[in-house]
Amino acid sequence: MMQPNSHYNDLKEDYLFRMIAAKTADFMKEHPQKKLLRMGIGDVSLPLPPSVIRALHEAVSDQADPLRFHGYMPECGADFLREAIAAHYGKRGILIHPSEVFVSSGASDELGDLQDLFAPVNAALVMEPAYPAYADACVIAGRKILHLPSSWENGFLPVPDDRLEADMVYLCSPNNPTGAVFTKELLRDWVEWANRRGAVILFDAAYEAFITDEDLPRSIFEIDGAKTCAIEICSLSKTAGFTGTRLGYTVIPEALLRQGMSLNRMWVRNRTTKTNGISYILQKGGAAVFTEEGQREIRENIAVYQKNAAVLSEALEIVGIRFTGGKNAPYIWMNCPDRMKSWDFFDLLLREIQVVGTPGAGFGEAGEGCFRFSTFGSPVDTEEAAKRLFGLLCGIREGMVRL
Ligand code: PLP
């Protein structure tokens, strides 16, 4: 009889966003006249930039023309896009060869698929609080997981330690949900740790485009020695509004070898077996992101989210609530007032001001007592949410709100 992968039984129930949706729906059934402000979900609200839309339309027309039509695309990505991405790194002084770039249908897909490169015996270190896909992908693969909690004490940026007996580590910077960004010094420590151990860093850079501080690294390959120990996973979802269109890329350096095997060659072999490439149309749209015009347009969209972050941050600063993120990241991670539990704070926000956020406990135990706001909503809703939040937090401080 077929034996199912019993590791699925080990997955924690994915109740976070379902529970948020259920609680919100119940509240709205009872109070249909209330205006709800959704600041929870990490999905963009602005459409794709005009140059991307134009490129997508042109690519659709190509597919209608016998002379310009494209059939199967190369499994690892079209040369035009791999070259554009390598050149994009080059502009920041990072030398990446197009053969080291793999076009993907998004970071989530890659975070799961890349597990194929690692034997099940390898233990994975997962920073916490973190995007749940890292731990889930390891659970499905039957891998041992070592949780690496972070807190206010270390700015939600865990540091490596030679006692950590792991063979691979997931790092995310800027981090979802905390918005914390690794400095070059901290990343250097991780790179040295990985090279010393022969471990591999899976570096999720899905939010790199939100880094404005010139001193903070946007790529792990800004760090010397990273090419012998790191894989970088990137996404156009938040960078350029591709959440529903789907496109990303992964960089696996040629220099990344373990026990004489090249992880780059292994991934070429994996992709040629498991995919038939990403749609020509999407890759054309993606290439437009890396043009001068595309870069200018995505910066305009990102600036809207950054303004949202500034509006929310200001409200929290004035009331004196401790928070991280917002400056180089599209998430704000705040301490719940009065040592409240994160789901209690969720209920309070819904009941009193109809603002929906994400309870920190949903990102692992280390997230309890904290709360995440996304800055991807509309500016009008964000302004209104910031006003309501400010009023509520002042009310709590003055003992005017029943907790
Ligand atoms: N990595 C992180 C840290 C994320 O927060 C997300 C989505 O929210 C992803 C990856 C997934 O990105 P994609 O849309 O490219 O699958």
Image: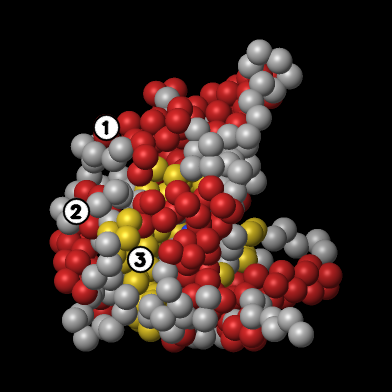
Q: Mark 2 points at which residue?
A: 223
Is residue 97 or residue 341 the one in the foreground?
97
Q: Are marks 3 and 2 in contact (CB under 8 Å)?
A: no
Q: Where is residue 330 in the image (x, y as percent from the top left)?
A: 44, 54
Of the residues shown, which amino acid type is indicated by label 2?
A: Ile
Of the residues shown, which amino acid type is indicated by label 3?
A: Leu
Q: Where is residue 379 in the image (x, y as percent from the top left)?
A: 55, 45
| For marks 3 and 1 on the same chain, the one whose residue lies earlier in the sequence | 1
Mark 3 is surrounded, within 10 Å at the Cα level, by few (under 14), some (14 to 19) or many (20 or more) other residues, namely many
Say which residue appears at 63% left-offset and 16% top-offset.
Answer: 68
Quadrant of the rendered image containing residue 232: bottom left
Question: CA separation, marks 2 and 1?
Answer: 16 Å
| For marks 3 and 2 on the same chain, the one whose residue lies earlier in the sequence | 3
Kindly state the secondary structure of the residue where label 3 is placed. strand
Q: In this view, does 387 lie above or below 193?
A: above
Q: Which mark is residue 328?
A: none
Q: Name the residue under label 1.
A: 91
Kindly state the secondary structure of the residue where label 2 is placed. loop
Q: Name the residue under label 3.
A: 171
Whether the residue carrying mark 2 lies under 8 Å from ligand 1 is answered with: no
Q: Position of residue 398 (x, y in %)?
A: 46, 79
Say which residue appears at 53% left-offset and 71% top-offset.
Answer: 137
Locate the C terminus and report the quarter of the image it occupies: bottom right
Relative placement, left or right, of 59 versus 223 is right
| For marks 2 and 1 on the same chain, the one whose residue lies earlier in the sequence | 1
Quadrant of the rendered image containing residue 80: top left
Quadrant of the rendered image containing residue 191: bottom left
Relative placement, left or right, of 131 versus 167 is right
Q: Where is residue 174 in the image (x, y as percent from the top left)?
A: 36, 58
